[in-house]
Amino acid sequence: MSAVDPFGVSTSGIQLPGYEIGAVLYRVGARVAYRGIRLADAAAVDIVTLDAAYPHPKQVAELKRDGAIARKLSDIEGVLRVDALLLHGRGNLALVCEPMPSSLQQRVDAAQGQGLALDDVLDIASRLAGTLGAIHARDIVHKALMPGHVLCDPDKCAIRLTGFGIASELEQERQGGQLTQHLEGPLPYISPEQTGRMSRDLDYRSDYYSLGVILYELLTGRHPFEASTVLEWVHSHICRLPPPPHELSPQVPEAVSGIVLKLMSKSPEARYQTANGLIHDLQRCRHALHSTGQIRTFALGERDLADRFFLPHTLYGRRQELEQLFSLFESVVRGGLELCLVHGAPGVGKSSLVNEIDKPSVRERGFLVQGKFQQFQHGDTYTVLATALRGLVQQLLAEPEERLAQWRERLHHALKSNARLVTDLVPELELVIGQPPEVIELPPVEARNRLHIVLTNFLRVFAGEGHPVVLFLDDLQWCDAPTLEFLQRLVTARELSHLLVIGAYRSNEIGAGHPLRLWLDDLHGQINVRDLRLGPLGPESVARLVADALNREPDEVAALSDMLHDKAQGNPFFTNELLRQLHKEGAITRDNGSRKWNWDLDAVRWSGVSNDVVEFMVENLRRLEPATQRVLQLAACIGSTFDLQTLSAVYQHPLTETAAVLLPALRQQTIVPLHSDYRLVADSAEPAGFNPSYRFQHDRVQQAAYALIAAQRTSEVHL
């Protein structure tokens, strides 16, 4: 935010009927705030609008969403009051807000690299924690906390939170994993999970990380990290540990420093879990400061009693298999070419196992990309491979221009006159190399061979010393024949190195004559294939999973974990769904006064629950409204991933209505959004400009939605 003289700068042409517009107060990103007077009652107001003659529809939709959520939270004292949303100009929007003369960013700027007074920081922290606790209780995650979104009125000792344009209204939300230059959220303040590189969902605890970064800055006068590119910011938030604030500023007590570092823990489980727990520690510090003038260290989080039930983000019972995967990665770092096939029953954790290597230690040393084949419709050939290759290009686009130029030269050299074959599959490549000319047409067999050679050369650019590539293709049992043929060429190519190809498939669906079985039999005779078979979890692993979920020891949960193991037969996906259902039905409840969870064994001896995971999921889906069930059936016919415009066309309802019908399924995590635009459809004057994509939480959920369709109607609704 750049402050402009609030007393001497007049408006640059904005007109709102019924309001007198005065001087510029401040700017935040693309937004500008003006002083204003409401003519009807001469009340002072602030006018927040987009600082552009022709604003982008997405910016307008985010501003509208900001105002709409703020009005929904109008009973929370710490949220900026928005009195009206008014259209003006050429598609612009203005929020009419309560007057707040300055922001926390202006206070930081005025301090010129020095920290604010300790008592002021503790007061600000307590107020913000209280406001966050209140909005989190409404299942809203802010996602854009930064000093520019904290407004102040020193005369009234008031602090208000604004900037809800990208806020999530889902209890948990998965961030997009591909990097571009435009990562969602303010880069210096986003949490590790908000980068999309942590293979885990984002929840309300992400805001606590951002609050920790703000407090760090208020105490020390500097950011905990310094970076100049998207990749550097991502690396910092995921991997780097900041210097403790008390080591940078003598005025910061070690106890306060500890609170900030706890908020900034890389793992959400290690952060504060509740606003009340955080406020208790902050007030304890403030009381000590006022009464004795000094703050001694103490055990943090003693009153921080979690009140939300989360399933653990841990892989159980797969240590040996995970070690083998990391060993294969080290092999390709040294220049190897490896093929690993992970197989087992549905829900056994094949994808979860491979996603465990999607860690900073791998990402920092190379590229990891993936694609997933569809269950009920194969679509065009090479589409899944194209999705994976697109991930390589998107990571290039996050590089600074100097590095990007080097990659551009390598790509031109490798692809030569055949670059168009790759841009047809991955249009984003044109952002790197420009628009290539058309290629000469060849007969089908020669054209296929040429494409395979060009794609191999394309991968060779990325797979090299210092930057190996991990290519993960999930659900190979649904792979199209041309892609299988290309993969065979790829993993047997002598000119390739520094490449690890991982394929996952359902072994129970691969019969003797299945194309994948024939492909595997042929491949085993040519190269060394690493086989990783995943079986069900043993009773000990299930007991550990249940114990971690309930914050207890395995022996305490033995009876419950034994029952869950019997019901789910050691299937991790089914086990997690059963635990989720137990909590939803009230059989798992928080133990008041501790961090543990209790369960009612009598209540959970539900003999009527199916032992089949698909039947179990079908029963869950039947609890949704009929319209939501109907749209999920249609989505299941499209595929495991689907976009809103296609679904809306099949459903024969407007985009906004289709998105609204999907919302209950989003809230219960039946489906997950793949892009943040899903939030903006309802808030846009041009909803057709948005086409968010979604994914079924798991193939078994898609299968359950598909099973809802009456047999005689399957061909009628199938695409």
Image (cartoon, rainbow, N blue to C red):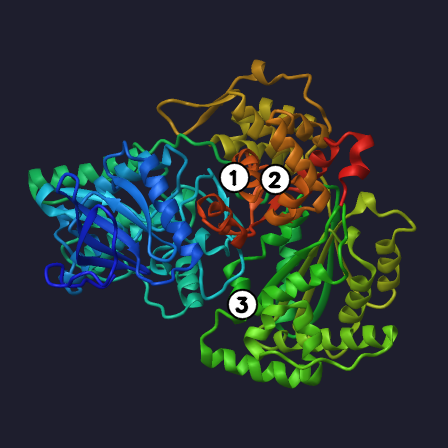
**Dot 1: what SS?**
loop
Q: With 289 as the anchor, is 392 left or right in this view?
A: right
Foreground disc of the pair 1, 2: 2
State the CA–CA distance, disc 1 to disc 3.
29 Å
Q: Where on the picture, by quarter, is residue 540?
A: top right
Kindly indicate the quadrant of the structure image that contains residue 664. top right
Identify the residue at horizontal 80%, vertical 58% (top origin).
480
Percent of width and height locating residue 281:
24, 38
Q: Which of marks 3 and 2 is in front?
A: 2
Q: Is residue 153 left or right of residue 59?
A: left
Residue 635 seen: no
Neighbours of disc 2 within 10 Å: few (<14), some (14-19), many (20+):
few
Say what amino acid the circle numbered 2 marks: His
From the viewer's side, name the closer residue of 504 and 439.
Answer: 439
Q: Name the outermost residue toward the top.
A: 602
What's the CA distance linking mark 3 and mark 2?
36 Å
Q: What residue type is labelled 3?
A: Gln
Residue 43 against residue 620 in the figure, above or below: below
Residue carrying label 3 = 395
Which residue does the numbered mark 1 point to in the structure image? 312
Residue 220 at what x, y percent from top left? 20, 59
